[in-house]
Image: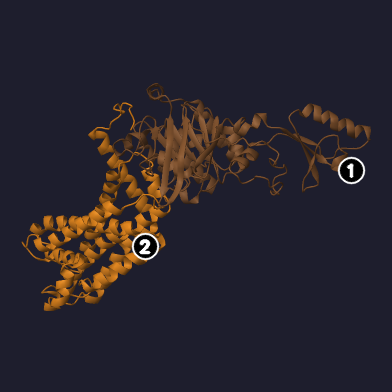
Chain colours: A orange, B brown
Amino acid sequence: MSTAVPHTAARPGPGRGLAMLWHQIRYEQLTFWRNPQSAFFTFILPIVVIGAFGLLFGDVGKSSFFYGRSALQYYIATITALSILGACYSQLAIVLAARRQNGILKRVRATPLPASMYFTGLLAHCALVSTVDTVLITAIGRAYGVPLPSASQWPVLVVTVLLGAAAFCALGVAVGSLIRNAEAAPSVVQFILFPMVFISGTYMPIHSDVLSAVTGALPVKPFNDALLAAFTDADAGFAWRDCGVLLVWGVLGAVVAVRRFRWDPRPE
Amino acid sequence: MRAPVTPTASARDAEQARTADAVVVEDLKKSYGPVQAVRGVSFTVRHGEIFALLGPNGAGKTTTMEILEGFRTRDADSGRVDVLGLDPGERATARTLRERIGLVLQDIAVEPYLTVRETVARNAGYYPAPRDIDEVIELVGLAGMEKKKVRSLSGGQKRRLDLALGMIGDPALLFLDEPTTGFDPNARRSAWQLVRALRDAGTTILLTTHYMEEAQELADRVAVIADGRIVDEGTPATLGGRNTERARIRFALPPGCSPEDLPVTALPGEDGLVTVESAEPTGTLHQLTGWALARNTELAQLTVDRPTLEDIYLRLTGSGRGVPADTPHKKRGRARKGAPEKTSEGSTP
């Protein structure tokens, strides 16, 4: 529409782009750590749960009920998954709904910060928190005498954690995009999450073929299983099928997020 | 707050040479479903001026602003919208445009747990050539509060932080949507001073406000929008023919007199005062005072005034027409039924 010559002088080079991304990640971290609520739900809760499970199930040795693992070996994996669900899916859905409603997203949109960098900042933050959660839970497990994953499984564990973090971030943004009312966000998030973790074996191993078939196609159980393999099976490599299901859910979430995400509190 | 603002951008001179006007809007239209919110709005904002868009809630003011800011799309059959030579609806140039405009919007908020300085520093990092962080904090009057968390600021202080975020990128064009709502009178005057200083340093400012005093004090030119159309445009002094409007002489009728006893035509008002309208107030006043002196009486509460910007605004937007003295908070009466109708047919030049 405009016939004016485009402004070419100040096009940012890749160096400035990286600097801005780093800047964004730093401030996203700062924003998170300053908020006592988010710090509580993403760190304290999983630590308390695994701490309590250690006391409750510390003596329960390997059994077929826990797929041939000790109780605590099993829970290290599922509670790690749970903490990543909290840090990525719940956190993002609630935070984005709230930021949209009170106008923080619109303020971001009013600046030249590209949307891709805003989301990369969030993703990097979630990946970092997920990593810290994994390390903390592993360390607590070690304190209760659970053996560390075998050396060959560490890269598998790292990749699985990051894949799960990314997939549940995408799902979090998707759910956060569909929620109109920020006050309802925590309930909507829990309404989806709680039954899901319950039937996906997070608290109790699943021994029903029907339930396994159903939840195997949902995102939480494949993540639990992939982490369980990464934590406890020596030289098991990747749980390809589980990672594949997770990836599909991640892509699905990303598609919904891209199509439905809004910056503006008032829909057009 | 401290003035003057140091002029920074030499790029701004290039900007002004490149485009004739900062903002050009021609026949802008926007519908929400069957509702036409904006029905063919046209106006032009020149480089380096403060332009105020006035209008009641729901008149299409905010919609127009948000289209210019790139937050909303416009109808396909709209005419031209040009902001600093760019189309705000064009995604490819959105980032370039955002680097050169600043926004202070009503429904904008910032992270509650960051401090004032962190908030400003965070946004400074988004611009290619931002202003100095501490200078901006001082300019908006938040010096000494750098380490305060945003959540502990008062409403007026948050608004000033908004203003800091609007100007941190050193914009060529600044959008201010009701910038001083919630300010106390002192803070408002300081904000006006700052806005004027920004204008004097070369920033073009597009402002909306509900305060006629603010438009009067700040704007170089104003446009009044009502029912999705521009109903008039001019300087605060000439809007709606204000400069050529008849003067109004008002006083309390002396005891025992009726309006018919007066040497000139007077209209009684509900507040017990009578109003005399005159194109030549000097002569009319002479007649009246001569009459009073000859009868050895007093014209109590005598005032002579012209319609205020608010009177004109209310008449243009249709909310004050023919209803005298229905605003108890305001002493002066409004434009009366006898006043000539100056409403122009849109403002397309």
Q: Pinpoint residue B281: horizontal percent, then vertical percent.
A: 77, 29
In 3D space, how far apart are the residues under numbered discs 2 and 1 (Cα atoms)? 70 Å
Return the chain for callout 1. Answer: B
Label 1: which residue? B257
Number of marks drawn: 2
Q: Pinpoint residue B226: horizontal percent, then vertical percent.
A: 53, 43
* In the image, residue A26 above or below residue A182: above
Indicate the secondary structure of the residue bearing disc 1: loop
Query: In percent of the image, x 85 and y 33: which residue is there?
Result: B288
Nearest to the observer: residue B19 or residue B10: B19
Residue type marked 2? Ala
Q: Pinpoint residue B331: horizontal percent, then vertical percent.
A: 73, 44
For marks 2 and 1, give the one nearer the viewer. 1
Label 2: which residue? A185
Q: Quadrant of the N terminus of chain B?
A: top right
Mark carried by residue A100? none
Q: Same chain for labels 2 and 1? Say yes or no.
A: no
Return the chain for callout 2. Answer: A
Residue type marked 1? Cys
Query: In percent of the image, x 26 and y 37: which residue is there?
Result: A17
Considering every residue shown, the one lying at the far left of the view is A235
- The crowd level at tag 2 (other Cα within 10 Å; few <14, some 14-19, many 20+) is many
Indicate the secondary structure of the residue bearing disc 2: helix
